[in-house]
Image: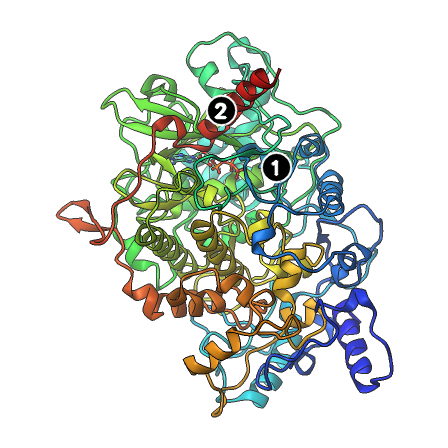
Amino acid sequence: MSSLTRLLQEKRKNEASNSSPRTSADTLTTTPESHPLDAQTRNKSSSHIASDSNSSNGERNRATMPVPGSVTTVTQIYSEEDSSSTAGSSLDERNQFSSSFLNSNFAHTASLYGTSAQRAAGLSSYGGSSLAPQNRITSRLSATSHTSGKVIPSLSSSIPYSVPNSNKDNNSSNSNSSSLSSSWLETYAGGLPSNISAIDSNVISSPKVDSVEPRFIISKQKLQKASMDNNNNTTATQARSISRSGSFSSQLGNLFFSKNSKESSNPNSAGMTYPANSNGPSTSIKNSNVANGSTAIPKPIRARQSSIYSVSRQPTGSYTDNLYGSPSSVHDHLPPSQSVPRSQHSSIGDLKRFFKKSSSSNLSSNNNNAIPNGSPVSTGMAVPSHSHSSSHFAAGNYPSSNSYNGNGDTIYSHAHGSAVPFSKRYVKTGEDLGAGAGGSVKLVQRIVDNQIFAVKEFRTKFENESKRDYVKKITSEYCIGTTLNHPNIIETIEIVYENDRILQVMEYCEYDLFAIVMSNKMSYEEICCCFKQILTGVQYLHSIGLAHRDLKLDNCVINEKGVVKLIDFGAAVVFSYPFSKNLVEASGIVGSDPYLAPEVCIFAKYDPRPVDIWSSAIIFACMILKKFPWKIPKLRDNSFKLFCSGRDCDSLSSLVTRTPDPPSYDESHSPEKKKSEGSSNNVSDPNNVNIGPQRLLHSLPEETQHIISRMIDLAPACRGNIDEIMEDPWIRSISMCRMVEDGLAFKVVEGDDHHHTQVDQSEAHIAGLEKKKKKDKQNNYQVSV
Ligand SMILES: Nc1ncnc2c1ncn2[C@@H]1O[C@H](COP(=O)(O)OP(=O)(O)OP(=O)(O)O)[C@@H](O)[C@H]1O
C-alpha cells in the first residue's frame, strides 16, 4: 500500500471517528475552526485513489534525501519541520522567513547539492527584498533517492490524466490505471471536464546503466564509415549494429569520447580557463529600482539536479578561450567529491521514441535533403510527427541540415558553411550572457555576416559521472533544441563538437525577461503580452508532446522587438509520443523551487504538463508582484502553507489529489457572491484574503484572477490545460506581439497597447546583473569601512 493510499485511508478513518484527535502536523489550516470552502469543493480524492499496484517501485527523486530508507512520498505532511511553521505571514511579509525556515532550506540544499551547499551557505534572506541573481543554486534535481523498496506512488495512480488527442472511448486495457480510469469514468461519465480523460498506462523510463561497456563503444570514424557504407552490403551488418546499439546517445557519446580519448594527449585540445564569473556566496541586496515598497525577486534556489546539472554554476572551462587562442589551463572536471546523481528524466530511450527513429538512410552521409526541418540528421532521428506539430515542422524553415561533415565537428546544423570549423566561423564578442549548471552562454559574432548569436557551451563530464549519463543529458537538451520550431522558442542554429566542447549556437535575444522585470519599468500591458507569449510557447510544446519543466523568468529571453522565447530545454521531457495515447509521466523534483508545482515535491511520478501551467502562473505573479509568492511549495514554507489553508482538506496530498467536481447546477460563481466572500476579515474564514488561493489572487488584477486560479489549482487534475487557458477571455483579449510570415521572412506585428521595455545592455542579462550586484556590494563595503 502506498504512503498516499495509507494517508488517505487514515484520513477517512479519522473522519469516521470524530473523537480521534488530529495531529498538528497533519493539519493544513492555520486555525482549527477553519470553515470548509463550500459544499461543492468537497474532497473526493478518496474515491479515486487507486491501489498503488501500478505505481513503480522505482527510485524516487527527492529533495530530502538525507535519511536513508525514508519513505519519500508525502513526507511533508507529517514532517516535524512542516508543522513547525508558524502561521500569520502574508505576501507582504516576504522578508520574514524564519531562521528555522532558512536553515531547513539550507539543510535541504546542502544535503542535495554537495558542493552547492557552500554556495547555499552564502545565501541570506532569500525571502524577498533582494535581487540576488547569484542565489541561483543551479543544480538540477533528479537525484534518485532509493526508497528501501517501498512502493512510491505516481500521481496518476491516484488521479486520472488526460493525454493529447486522447479520447475517452479509447482506453487501452493494459494497465491497472485503465481499470481505475474506467471506474472513474463510469462514475463520472458525462460530467468530465474537457481536460480529463482516462490514462492508458504509465510508461516507465528506460533502465539506468552506470557505465558503457567497451564493446558498445563505437568510434566516430566507425560511425562515419557506417554512414557512408550504408548501402554497401559488406558493411550492412556493421551499420545495423551501430544503429541498434547506437542509440542517439551512444552514437554521440562515442563521438565525444572517442575523440576525447584520442585528443587527450593533444595539447591543443586542452580546455581553457573559464572566465571567473562564478557565483560566489552572496548576500541579498536591496534593489533600489523597486518602487512602491514592492521588492525584487530574489533568484531562486535551484531545485533541479541531474547528471548534467547536478552542481551549481561551477566554472568548467571555456570554449572561447580554447577557440580563440587564449592561454590554456585544464580543469574539465569537478572535484572527485562531487556527487553526480543519476537522472531519470529526458532519457534517451524516451527521446528516441519521441523523435521516431527514421530509416537507416539517415545515417547516410548524403543526407542533406533526406531529413526535413532541422532534425538532428546525424542521429538517425526524424522529427516528431504529432499531428498538431505538423504545421510547425512542415513549415520547412530550415534550409538544410548538415550531418557529420568532412571535419566531423558539426553535429547538427542548418547554417551555411558549417563545414568550416566553428572557430573559423565565429568570434567571441562582448560579455558572457550567463552561466548555469548546464553550461555557460556567450555572445559570438559570425564572421561571414557579423550576425550575433548566443552560444551555449555544455558543461564537461563530471569525474564520477558515467559517460552514458552525461551524454544522455546533453543529447536530450540539444535534441529537443534542434527540433523545436516556433517563434516563442529559441532557435538552435547548429550544434558543434570542437576541442572537446559541445557548443549549441542559438539565435540571440537581447534581454533576459528576468532583467526586464527587475527594471520595474514594465507596463501591465507589456507584462500581459510577455505572459501570453510564454503561454503560446508552452502551447506549442505541449501540442508536440513535450513539457519544459523548468519554466521561470530566467528561462525566458526577449529580443529587442519584444518577442519572448523560451530557452533551456535541459529539463524537458516527452510526455506523449507520436500516435500514442499514453501519458508518459515525468519523475524527479526538477525545476526551480519557487516555480515548482506542489505535486512535483510529493509524487514520484506526475504529469509534466500541469507543472508547466503552474510555473507559468508563478511567472505571471512574479512579473506583477516583483516577488515570489512563496519560496517553495512545501508546507514548511509559511506563505505556501497559508495559500493551502482555509480549504476543506486537512492535508496537502488530499488537495493535490483532488479531482474535478462534476458540473453542478447550483454552483454559484456570481460576482456578488464572490465579492461578499472576499470581504471577510475572519481568519478562520476560507475566503479571507490572507489564506487560501485568495491570498495570492487578490494581489493580482481582477480580470486575471479566474484563469490564474485555474492555473494554480493545487490539484493538477483540476488545473486548466493550456488550450483552456488560451481560450480564457482575458488571455484572448491580450494584445500580443507576434511574428507573422512576410513573404519568405517573418516580421513582428507589435501589440497595439504597449512597447517593450529595453534596458542597458550591461544589465540586460543575468550575468550583467550579477556583476552589477557584486560591484554594488563592493562599493557598499568600501563605504561602510
Ligand atoms: N539565446 C540566448 N540569448 C540570450 N541570452 C541567452 C540565450 N540563451 C541563454 N542565455 C543566457 O544564458 C543564461 C543561461 O542559459 P541556460 O539557462 O540555457 O543555461 P543553463 O546552464 O541551463 O542555466 P541554468 O542552470 O540556469 O538552467 C540565461 O539565463 C540567459 O541569461
Of labels 2 and 1, earlier in sequence is: 1
Query: Badge 2: few (under 14), some or many (20 or more) residues near its Cα, within 10 Å?
Result: some
Q: How many marks?
A: 2
Three-letter amino acid code at the position of disc 1? Ile
Numbered label attached to residue 335: none
* Residue 180 is at least partly visible in this image: yes
Q: CA distance from mark 2 to mark 1?
A: 16 Å
| Image vertical order of residue 101 relative to residue 467, above or below | below
On the picture, is 91 further left or further right than 73?
Answer: left
Three-letter amino acid code at the position of disc 2? Lys
Tell me the quarter of the image containing the N terminus: bottom right
- Image depth: mark 2 or mark 1 in front: 2
* Residue 583 is at least partly visible in this image: no
Please state the horizontal and vertical placement of residue 476, each as a whole percent of the image: 51, 44
- Does the residue tagged 1 have its C-beta within 8 Å of any atom of ligand 1? no
Task: Quickly name the residue at label 2.
Answer: 771
Observer-nearest of 297 and 492:
297
| Image vertical order of residue 694 relative to residue 554, above or below | below
Observer-nearest of 91 and 203:
91
Could you tell me which residue is drawn at 63 percent across and 42 percent down? 306
Tell me the quarter of the image containing the C terminus: top right
Q: Tell which residue pokes out farthest to the top in this image.
A: 327
Numbered label attached to residue 137: 1
Please state the horizontal and vertical placement of residue 652, each as a whole percent of the image: 68, 67
Image quadrant where residue 778 sits: top right
Please state the horizontal and vertical placement of residue 182, each as a whole percent of the image: 59, 84
Observer-nearest of 666 and 382:
666
Could you tell me which residue is drawn at 42 percent across and 79 percent down? 671
Could you tell me which residue is drawn at 60 percent across and 27 percent down? 314
- Does the residue tagged 2 have its C-beta within 8 Å of any atom of ligand 1? no
| Image vertical order of residue 599 relative to residue 632, above or below | below
Q: Which element is circle 1 on?
A: loop
